[in-house]
Image (cartoon, rainbow, N blue to C red):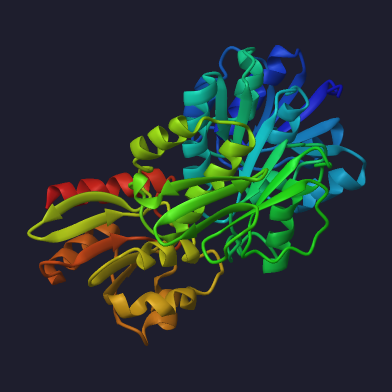
Amino acid sequence: MDIPDKILIVGLGKTGIAVAKFLSAQKKEITITDIKTEDALNNALSELKDIDFKSTFGTHNREDFLKNEMIVLSPGVDSEMPLIKEAKEKGIRVVGEIELASFFVTEPIIAITGTNGKTTVTTLLGEIFKAQFKDVFVGGNIGNPLINYVMGGKKAKFVILEISSFQLETIYSFHPHISMLLNITEDHLDRYRSYDEYIGAKLRIFENQNEKDVAVINKNIMIHTPIKAKKFFFSIKDILDEGAFYKDGFMFVRLDGKEYIYRRDLSPLTGEHNTENLLSCLIVSHIVGVDRAVIEDTLKKFRGLPHRVEFIKNIDGITFINDSKATNVDATKRALEGMKGNVILIAGGKDKGGSYKEIASEMRKVKALFVIGEAKERIEKELGLYTKVFKEKDLKDAVIKAYEMAEKGDTVLFSPMCSSFDMFRDYKERGNVFKQIVESI
């Protein structure tokens, strides 16, 4: 597809920077806008010192949105904001970075979405594919924009992408050869008008697939949308004639009349949610013909991700777990499901609109709950019936008091259920602060 000459980039995060560099190399006339001030964007702007662009910072200028021929949104920008809607009504094309970059990608794309597990599956699948095929690009919402792959000029055997609902809002022609839908639970209800709207954004991953493509789906998800791609399912509850499933300590893949069996304890990743993650990786790996020995070797080596049910330290018999990546209630529920013994839970942050009562079935394990951030009042209101709740001014106070309360054999689990933006730059900074506090005890 031809890209017009005059383009507005909305949002100057990592994605916006990459898009600006790419469009500059394409000799396009660029305007950049961000509601953050120029001083707040100083680090980002330093990366763009060698390219020419116009800018509006600290606010949005209506003229910027209406005089350009295309608008490229960063994932964090709400595609329903009034200026965007006005531009669309005028016929200006509004796309995201994933859509823009995909114009230039001819290699097979594997796109992974879901409320939880996206980063784990994207990373693990990337490791499996790299061991088999060597030249593989892994990126998208995981932190390496797809446009970087386009600019790099090298051709990969496969392009593996984590895709968020925000990114799927702004696709038109994005066409994965293999799409993966891991799960859907309430999330981002501060962004979407309803849970159904959030689900609708996720289901767009199948929108442009055809009969030659593949869709890999968690069998527990009820989908009421037509899917043209050939469907394969994975399940931890049902035995499947074709697909991937778990039974009695083993993971099975049935494909094209063949059966492959893997011991579940090959992988150090624990919990039912990780069994689902592993099954999704197994079925995709076999669909594209990865060797069994490569799969087994990679499963053994893969230790999981930082900030996702990450063991930090044992102090006086008390275990500290960093689950800062749990930015929604379902992620915390999954973390609690994998816990043994008594848990002291630290949670809170910027509220995203979902119900905290979703973890009620696991609250019998939680002997105390320490809450912080903007959401602490609401968390206390919804979960105070199930355990003692202590409201703290910051993360340090919560960690110290949780340690003072904990007894030998207890686990202090930091699993916020909320986004980090009320107190931290992102979940990584939040998790690293938690680690530093624990290390200082």
Task: Give how far across and how far down residue 143 sits, in percent.
Answer: 52, 35
Is residue 350 in view from this perspective? no
- Measuring from the top left, give residue 20's x and y in whole percent: 66, 23
Residue 87, x across and y down, in percent: 85, 43
Query: In the rendered view, would you say 309 is above or below 223?
Result: above
Query: Who's the residue at 23% across and 49% down the image?
Result: 312
Extreme residue toward the front, this view: 257
User: 246 and 205: which one is in front?
Assistant: 246
Give residue 155's position: percent from left, percent from top.
64, 15
Apparent side of residue 309 relative to residue 114 in the rendered image (left or right): left
Residue visible at 36% across and 55% down? 270
Q: Is residue 53 visible?
A: yes
Say left or right for 203 vs 378.
right
Residue farthest to the left, as pictured: 316
Which residue is painted at 34% across and 50% down in the image?
Answer: 265
Q: Residue 45 lies in what quarter of the image?
A: top right
